Image (tube, grey):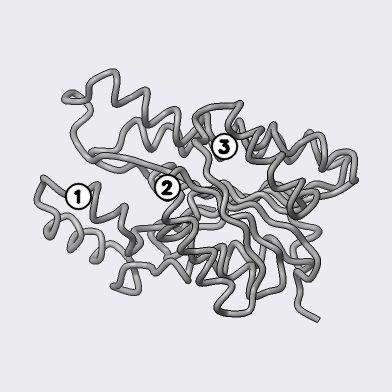
């Protein structure tokens, strides 16, 4: 029997990149996966990929920056699949530019997607997990939260907030047997990486990122998915409030 058999997972931002890899990995491990994305076409592509691999998936469109939209997505998952056992807060967005060149509307978008969105998702699944007496919450932060990242001040601040949020929820929800952990990717080959480095000297930035990683390569979405799958598994039932960096960019204790 697969390790996540009969478990129901909701993955945000699962229409591409890291989110797609996470959704595919959890489905491969036996979970029934709600593929949530603001881009319904991308969500449907992921859904079809999972089904082609004999997995079980449901595409759901939602803008995680709107609490009502998140609650509606959770209701759709309840009706189609059942109660959510695993939440993966993966959806994110950024644009690389110096802080003094940022406009306030950019700050708002980054904060809404990268911090408020995961807060909304955590709240939307909390009551069911508490009532069920268990669950797994895994949030994707970033090594930018741990060591900083030039051109990503507000993004790094939000990702640091995800770590603080997760550690606090881990303490509050431990009595309900809910595990809350964080995965921090280093630079990873995704469409978002290409997007956020567009309009600047992208090749130079990516080369510098690659040199900073001990393995001298960018991460892959599958590298991140493997870490998420571990936290979702029974093997991590006694682990909570932890932050796992993938790739070795930071080796903080």
Q: Nearer the viewer, mark 1 or mark 2?
A: 2
On the picture, is 196 further left or further right than 29? left
Q: Nearer the viewer, mark 3 or mark 2?
A: 2
CB within 8 Å, label 3 to label 2: no
CB within 8 Å, label 1 to label 2: no
Give the CA distance from mark 3 to mark 2.
17 Å
Mark 3, residue position: 118
Helix, strand or loop for disc 2: loop
User: Residue 208: horizontal and vertical position, in percent?
Assistant: 19, 59
Name the foreground residue: 114 vs 67.
67
Mark 1, residue position: 197
User: Residue 216: horizontal and vertical position, in percent?
Assistant: 29, 73
Around disc 1, counting alpha carbons within 10 Å, would you say few (fewer than 14), some (14 to 19), or many (20 or more)?
Answer: some
Up-down: is 62 above or below 216?
Answer: above
- Which tag, 3 or 2, sits closer to the chain's start? 2
Helix, strand or loop for disc 3: helix
Q: Residue 199 lies in what quarter of the image?
A: top left
Around disc 3, counting alpha carbons within 10 Å, would you say few (fewer than 14), some (14 to 19), or many (20 or more)?
Answer: many
CB within 8 Å, label 3 to label 1: no
On the picture, is 205 further left or further right than 137? left
Kindly identify the residue that appears in the image at 82 percent across and 43 percent down. Answer: 129
Q: Residue 17 lies in what quarter of the image?
A: bottom left
Mark 2, residue position: 39
Kindly identify the residue that appears in the image at 73 percent across and 52 percent down. Answer: 80
Kindly identify the residue that appears in the image at 69 percent across and 31 percent down. Answer: 123
């Amino acid at each position: 029997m697969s390790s996540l058999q009969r478990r129901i997972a909701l993955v945000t931002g699962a229409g591409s990149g890291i989110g797609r890899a996470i959704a595919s990995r959890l489905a491969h491990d036996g979970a029934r996966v709600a593929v949530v994305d603001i881009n319904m076409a991308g969500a449907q592509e992921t859904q079809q990929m999972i089904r082609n691999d004999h997995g079980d998936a449901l595409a759901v469109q939602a803008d995680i920056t709107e609490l009502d939209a998140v609650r509606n997505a959770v209701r759709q998952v309840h009706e189609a699949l059942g109660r959510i056992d695993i939440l993966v807060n993966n959806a994110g967005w950024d644009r690389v530019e110096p802080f003094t060149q940022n406009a306030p509307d950019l700050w708002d978008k980054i904060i809404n997607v990268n911090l408020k969105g995961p807060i909304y998702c955590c709240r939307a699944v909390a009551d069911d997990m508490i009532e069920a007496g268990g669950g797994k919450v895994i949030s994707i932060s970033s090594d930018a939260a741990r060591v900083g990242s030039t051109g990503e001040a507000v993004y790094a601040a939000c990702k640091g907030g995800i770590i603080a949020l997760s550690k606090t929820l881990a303490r509050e929800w431990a009595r309900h047997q809910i595990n809350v952990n964080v995965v921090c990717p280093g630079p990873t080959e995704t469409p978002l990486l290409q997007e956020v480095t567009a309009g600047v000297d992208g090749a130079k930035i990516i080369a510098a990122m690659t040199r900073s990683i001990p393995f001298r390569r960018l991460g892959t979405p599958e590298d991140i998915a493997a870490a998420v799958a571990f936290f979702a598994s029974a093997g991590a039932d006694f682990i909570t409030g932890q932050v796992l960096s993938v790739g070795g960019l930071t080796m903080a204790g």
